[in-house]
Image (spheres, grey):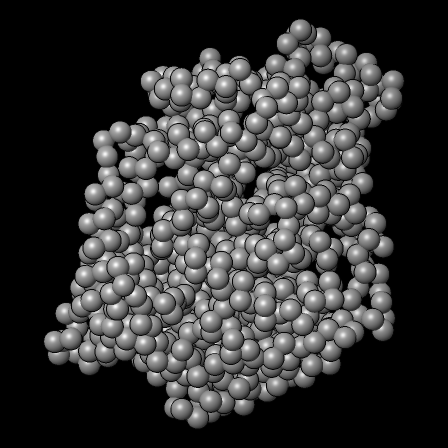
Amino acid sequence: MNINNQGDSCILCRKKFAPHEIFPTGFGEVRLNFMTFRVAQQAAVGGLLHHDYMEAIAPTSNRYYAQINKFPGWQEIAGGANALFDLKARGRHPFEGIRKLKSHLPDTPTFGFMRSYNGITMSPKPADILRDCVKLHIEAGLDGIRNFHSNNDPRHFNEVAKTTLEMGAHFQALFVYESLERDPTVYNVLEIVDFFSYMREELGAHSFILGDPSGILLPEMAKIITAEVKAAHPDIAFGIQANHTSGISYLSCMAAVSEGANFIDCAPSPLAEGVSLPSGSALFIALEEGGFDLGVDPVTRDQAFQALTEQDRYLDSIVNQLYQKGKPVKKPNANVLRTHIPGAQEQILLDRLIENGLQDKEAEIHELVAEIRIKNGGLPSATPNAEAWVEQALNNFFDCKRKIEPRFRDVLIGKVGITPLEIAPSLQKQALCEQVEDTLKQFVRTNKISADKLKTFSQPGNVVSHLVEYLYILSAPIRIRQRLQIVDNRINRLQRIQQYCHSDQAIHRRTYTYLERTIEKAGKVTQYGQAITTLKAAIQAWLNEKERLQSLIFSNGMSDDEYEMLLNGKPSNFIYKDILANNPNLEILVSDKQTLLDIIKAGCVIPWCDPEHLPNGLIQSTQELVDFAWKEKIILPINQHHFQEYVVLWAMFSDRQQRKIMEDFLRNYPGNTGYWQHPDPEKNKILKQLTIRSNSQPIRLTLTFLLEHFSTRSIREIELDLRKKLYSQEGDTLGGTLRIWESTVGVASPKAPKFLKVGFIAEDQYQGMELGMTICQIMDRPPLSPLQFPLNS
């Protein structure tokens, strides 16, 4: 199958928006960011908005942005789960979709949504893969990147921020809003202010946004946060994304702009509210009535609003078709203010319950979700944490044998970052034991461990629990120091807020009063039975916790450096021998050192930014993709830019279930036109096969192989053999254009890998691909990366 059909559309004639030309920063200046092509349609219709619909509505959407005189705001067209929907349901190459949409949005700044090291997926990826993912998104037509981390861990922002700035694009940092009713001191206002200060001073963020995926941001808190952030950073644009799940999004948005917020995320009216975002048309009228500057003058105002009206009318005509028959449209649910389930996850949960005929159990599941979230670290309810809470709640409800859901397990052992509250050690150790057991089973499947040998242990669980317990004790000083740092930072911020009591600034006094009021309302009781009703008492409780943690630190155990070396698979000989000496059954089970180290790492808590320690993965992903294409007889793009897009998609969607989706996409795109069905039930058109553009220009094609695969023969012998076999199969097609040579990449050194290059000239890309495939078959090896070079370039 040939998927080399994208031509040269990666280069578009489009308006380029500089990072400082997108958002205003002044008080009363507000812009509307429409989330039509990602968040809104995913929350409202489950991502069923087909690219045909997107491309039809994009010019109308662009007309709205074209009417804004200065600082237009931006439109979200990529990132998040968009690529997964493209691959799985829409039959569209994700990067080609960005290019196509951007071609219809020349006057609209566009951005993509990144999940820190997770990129556009749900699991961490190596830094080199993440960097290429960000670069390719920007090169496809994006003017900026919005990045977030589900735990608000600033360390996870580094790679995305650095790459975005290197590409000359706008970098926007998102803080996931969360609150704990039982303890308002955990998520306090200064945590948000300090987070954004770090984003600006250390990472160079151009703008900030407060994200509220659950719809729990109350109007008064929206005012206080906005006022404090703008007081600290008056020259930086600050905005808000408030989900409507609880029904209060309009109140929170209007409260934020009244204190200086500069932009609001919104949706077209047919895709608004429910578990989505507030209506952009409604906000336009409300903001205009309130005297806010929307960037339009009396002349362009009517044209801008007319564009919104036409956009709403078109989407209204198709959105009902996208709802499955009998599927209820979600209404605001104030109970979310307690359960904190994000809008999109709320819809997914309801779908799951409907599938099992358990929609009447929704309230019961909500109770389980709230209990799990609060008792296990108190993390923000954002992707992928929210999925972990819901899946674990469903597991508990159905009484599944596996007590800890895999994503929830990742949260417990630290793979997704630091939790604001301490996790129960017993639950953490249970998660580690399950991870070690899964690792052992995986090694049995791959024959690294003998199944019979594993069975010889009468109680293998005891072997696992002993290892986990031992490693948990060794890591105790590290975990305690980490928790001490969190508590110290919290005390520092609370003491700063306490000083606001005597501030001459009304903003600060309001922050102090609000926190005092919420602490009294929460009525928290300490483990010693003391009631906490004031900020002073709350600070004292945290000081007591600090003293308790300090008393737990002991000299035995690993240092930070030793533990980091262990997690990197390079422990010191002393540590390695010490672990084996205290776990002698491990060496009986397996003798290979690397396998032993992998088992040991599976039993370790992750106290740091784990993705930073992942080895580079692009080269391996490239080879895996080429091998798969070779096996399935798929011709990958010759254009190096497009080829790299496939490599990044392959690397991103590497989890078992998502890899299957990627493989199916490669097998069926675009040749099997019946694989994806158009969502329009009336026309039910088959997704149109994208036209393969003819290229009659002669091309020079170079195929690259690892030289070590042909070490038994000289270059001359390989060339003669190749010419002979080519002539017998293809006749005198290549003439004198074939040549073979040896090459190295980068600085030549004795350790540098050597490559075998096979170059030839073909009449056009089709003949080139056919001959290239023939050469690969003769060489009996897939190429590492095919490249196309037009002769006259």
Residue 790 higher or lower than 255, as above or below: above
Where residue 269 sits, quadrant-wise, is bottom right
Judge left or right: residue 453 versus residue 29: right
Q: Position of residue 689 (x, y in %)?
A: 81, 55
Residue 234 higher or lower than 157, as above or below: below
Residue 775 higher or lower than 409, as above or below: above
For the C terminus, give its image quadrant: top right
Please name whichever residue, 334 or 589, is drawn nearer the observer in this view of the structure: 589
Please name whichever residue, 467 or 212, is drawn nearer the observer in this view of the structure: 467
Please give the name of the residue rendered at 45% of the width and 28% of the height, measured from the top-left corner.
Answer: 467
Q: Position of residue 775 (x, y in %)?
A: 76, 24
Judge left or right: residue 749 versus residue 441: left
Where residue 103 sits, quadrant-wise, is bottom right
Do we see residue 451 in this rendering?
Answer: yes
Please give the name of the residue rendered at 73% of the width and 73% of the height, measured from the top-left corner.
Answer: 327
Residue 278 higher or lower than 619, as above or below: below
Please name whichever residue, 525 or 778, is drawn nearer the observer in this view of the structure: 525
Please give the name of the residue rendered at 36% of the width and 51% of the height, measured from the top-left corner.
Answer: 422
Q: Position of residue 648 (x, y in %)?
A: 59, 43
Do we see residue 82 in this rendering?
Answer: no
